[in-house]
Image (cartoon, rainbow, N blue to C red):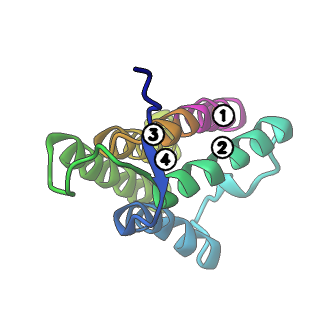
Amino acid sequence: MNTIRTSRYRFGFDIWGLLLFLLVMLPNFIWFAVPAPDDILRTESVTPVVDIIGSVFQVLTVACLCFVICKERSKFRFSPLVVATVACLAAYYIGWARYYADITALWVILLLTLPPCLAFILFAIDRKNLPAVVSAASFTVCHCIFGVVNYL
């Protein structure tokens, strides 16, 4: 007898996905309001097409993290992947602190580029959210191209 397999995902709302997004965006909100001393991030991008594609994947990532729920996921807990997500956020905040301390070295730009993307990917893996993993990985590629070409 053939059975029809139901979808692994459903639409819903994940408050933890929204919280992660807001925690990643917090330094950006500050940056919009209070520019850094030597604010190289405010220069015009030389990768506008990559930026647009990256923005689309960023929005998809956030939408998937917040509204796509895997039926097979476990209840939220501080698993090793969630702890690694928090560590990525800490590294990202360190990058912003160094950037505001007028340090724009390669490692600082990398801290502003990779850890937030890795936080999204690790969290999505923990939540068994494959659509979010795929969109976050695509966003990561675009974000890294943007960071390397424009600032390194």
Residue located 63% across and 49% down the image: 60
Check disc 3 and report its element: helix, strand or loop. Answer: loop
Sequence-wise first label, 3 or 1: 3
Q: Nearer the viewer, mark 3 or mark 1?
A: 3
Q: Position of residue 101 (x, y in %)?
A: 43, 60
Q: Nearer the viewer, mark 1 or mark 4?
A: 1
Q: Amino acid at mark 2?
A: Phe
Magenta-tinted stretch = 137-151
Q: Amino acid at mark 1?
A: Cys
Q: Which residue is mark 2?
A: 57
Q: Main secondary structure of the magenta part?
A: helix
Q: Which residue is mark 1?
A: 142
Nearer to us in this view, 3 or 141: 3
Q: Position of residue 59 (x, y in %)?
A: 64, 54
Tell me how far mark 1 sits from mark 4, CA to CA. 14 Å
Determine crowd level at label 4: few under 14, some 14-19, many 20+ residues with C-alpha closer than 10 A. many
Label pair 1/2, CB-CB below 8 angstroms: yes
Check disc 2 and report its element: helix, strand or loop. Answer: helix
Check disc 4 and report its element: helix, strand or loop. Answer: helix
Determine crowd level at label 2: few under 14, some 14-19, many 20+ residues with C-alpha closer than 10 A. many
Please, is residue 32 above or below residue 133 in the view?
Answer: below
Sequence-wise first label, 3 or 4: 3
Q: Which residue is mark 4?
A: 112
Tell me how far mark 1 sits from mark 2, CA to CA. 9 Å
Q: Position of residue 84 (x, y in %)?
A: 23, 43
Q: Amino acid at mark 3?
A: Thr
